[in-house]
Amino acid sequence: MSLACLLSMTCLGLSSCGSDDNEDAGGDVNGDNKVIMRSCSLEEGAEVNAKELTVITLSYNTKVTVVGDITLNGQAVEAGNGDLKMKVDVNVKLEDGTSYELHVPAGAIVSDEDKNCFAPEFKLTFKTKETPQSLDNDATRLTKTLGWGWNLGNHFDSYDGGNEKDNYRITWSKDCPYWDNANPTESLYKNLAKAGAKTVRMPVTWGPYEDMTDGNYTIDANYMAVVKQNVLWAKEAGLNVILNTHHDEYWQDAYTASSNPSVNTETKARLAATWTQIAEAFKDEGDFLILEAFNELNHNWAGPTSGELRIQNEWNQLVVDVIRATGGENATRWIAVPSYQANIGYALKADFKVPTDAANKIIVAVHNYDPYNFTLANPLTEAWGHNANSINDEKNIEKTLNQLYDNFISKGIPCYLGEYGCSAHTTALGQQCREYYLEYFCRAAYFAGLSMMLWDNNVATTGSESHGYFNHKDGSFVNNCGDLVSTMVKAATSDDPNYTLQSIYEKAPKK
């Protein structure tokens, strides 16, 4: 789906009909019947995705026919009339990172009404992006390693309400009363791998299990052991693991810390103590494990203060330094740091700083649930995309994800989508649009060089916040999601050049 843009008449020129300069070629014909190019579907000097652009369309003021060779970098290409005789579709097959010149010689396109009346010469130069599939840097290699991933959502990140001292804690027992109402087993991770997942993001809330009286914020040994058992099960299944601090945001108050130095000092001491313990517990584990500093630090969804953005950078740097200081595998393992709220917009701002790191192994972590009204809101908007009233839906996703590619991936800085997803909808149309959205989103992320982790909270109903795909106990599919998971895995990993966003768009549900 290329962007149509009118070219200036000075670039297009006029036909030879009635022109003294072309009487030998065009003959003496009526000058009022000139062949004029009205538009081209591609801008002069554009940069495009090689796998997405397959046709360049030239539009004329009259019905025309192609009678001569049209070339791309000197090689003849197929061209013919589309549905309307006033258009010429030029078929192109492009390579990544290449400059092109499309050349339409004078006389190659003639008027249907008068074969002696032809279009003038036209040249168009453009280039294709150096895509993630053609780049070879740390970012693209890590993306392929992480592939398509999944979140053990609402399990270890669960916590109760109440006061700080133990009252946030979910009482651990064999019944495992976490929010997802599940007790994961080794089978969960084996079945995730069987389904095509390469990575499990394991959100963990640590604060409720820290001793608030010993001065060291000591993490409960039983809780650490259960978390570690799940990490090792995932490892044995051949999966990568992302381990973070998740709903610890209740004590990670960037807003207050930004204006109160004593609160900042206290919070940083607790951050250092928490991350030292986590890092020490896993310092002998290999590169399959990524440590992620935070989830979504947030005080006000309407937007952070400049002080909060500063604190996010400061705390990200602190966590990196603390992890590195524990040595072992932690000296060189990948560490992920989020932007404020894990928001893509804040990641792209100049305020966001990637931490300095001697190992040079930092990942930028962001989340994306756009558009909110379709993926999370209550009630949900039932339709998405492929609609004249929302023609920019697909383009907005592409634009946003490609900005991450331009700002990070293309510069060798890995970036992943730690969360994405869409609530199960209540109507047949809503479910069809949801399936279309998830396939389109995963494919757009693939073209942007991003790995992605699906949010799954084990809720098998429909409506807002219904994100059940795998049973969190044994990894069996819920809600007959096997085909949908297979579609997402394919969209996120396939290198089939014919599997494009356009091909997905063309089979989207019509509304």
Image (cartoon, rainbow, N blue to C red):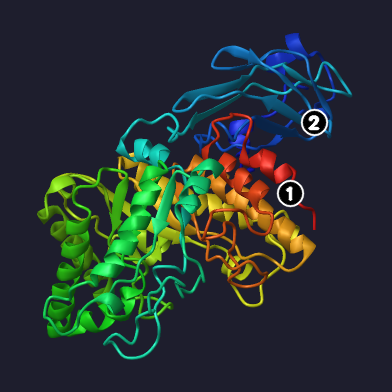
Local secondary structure at mark 2:
loop
Residue toward you, 39 or 35 = 39
Residue drawn at x 32%, y 44% is 288
Up-down: is 304 above or below 99? below
Up-down: is 267 above or below 364? below
Residue toward you, 49 or 115 = 49
Q: Quadrant of residue 37?
A: top right
Q: Which mark is residue 117?
A: none
Q: Which mark is residue 508?
A: 1
Q: Is residue 142 visible?
A: yes
Up-down: is 264 above or below 51? below
Up-down: is 30 above or below 147? above
Q: Residues within 10 Å of mark 1 (few under 14, many from 20)?
A: some
Residue toward you, 227 or 421 = 227
Q: Quadrant of residue 93?
A: top right
CA–CA distance in space, label 1 to label 2: 22 Å
Q: Quadrant of residue 208?
A: bottom left
Residue at the top extreme of this rendering: 24
Percent coordinates x, y for residue 306 in the rendering = 27, 74
Local secondary structure at mark 1:
loop
Percent coordinates x, y for residue 442 in the rendering = 55, 47
Q: Which mark is residue 82?
A: 2
Q: Amino acid at mark 1?
A: Ala
The earlier-in-sequence mark between 1 and 2 is 2
Q: Amino acid at mark 2?
A: Gly
